[in-house]
Image (tube, helix red, strand yellow):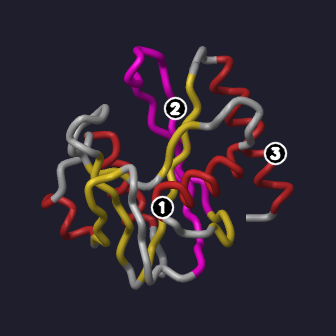
Amino acid sequence: MDKALLEDLCKELASAAAAEHVEKLVVGAFVVDKGRLLILQRKSDDFLPDVYETPGGGVEPRETIPHALARELAEETGLRLSSIGEYLGHIDYIEEHGRPARQFNFTVKVGSVNRIVHPEHLRYAWVSEEELSNYKMTGEMLKSIKDFFARRHD
């Protein structure tokens, strides 16, 4: 996505979330390699224990959504963000401290995917749409991933 368009979109998303009293902004990165989507399994003692999700996490104060995507992707997988693609919509939920949260999901391109590190998660998997039922996910995450696979054109 063009940098100026992305910046404008992200400002609009953050502004709309604030107007709707969303207290926590979160990002989700949809990384695909060879037709498979990268998902990570949360630790057993974490919020939403043992569920799978796309890489992502909270937007820090005074941090932009694109910067948060790059930072969270690197922290959770060791992957380096090359570019941000399509905005895939958002997921609203109540986060672990009881605050309303909104996760903004984007497709991303990365450099090499030869080595995934996942210090904040139990394990990772590359999944096809047909394999999704083998992985425990929240209903919202499952719907987002199914919607993603349904709109893919490559």
Q: Residue 6's mark?
A: none
Q: Nearer the viewer, residue 124 or 142?
A: 124
Residue that numbered label 1 is attached to? 30
Residue that numbered label 2 is attached to? 102
Is residue 21 magenta-colored? no
Point out the residue furthest to the right here.
4
1 and 3 marks in contact (CB < 8 Å): no
Q: Which residues are magenta?
A: 86-111
Q: What crowding class fits label 3: few (fewer than 14 Cα within 10 Å), some (14-19), or many (20 or more)?
A: few
* 108 to the left or right of 135: right
Q: Is 34 drawn above or below residue 80 in the view shown?
A: below
Q: Residue 8's mark?
A: 3
| Amino acid at the residue labelled 2 | Arg
Residue 97 found in image quarter? top left
The residue depicted at 34 percent of the width and 46 percent of the height is 141
Residue 122 placement (x, y as % from top left): 26, 54
The residue depicted at 42 percent of the width and 60 percent of the height is 148
Spatial CA distance of label 1 from label 3 is 21 Å
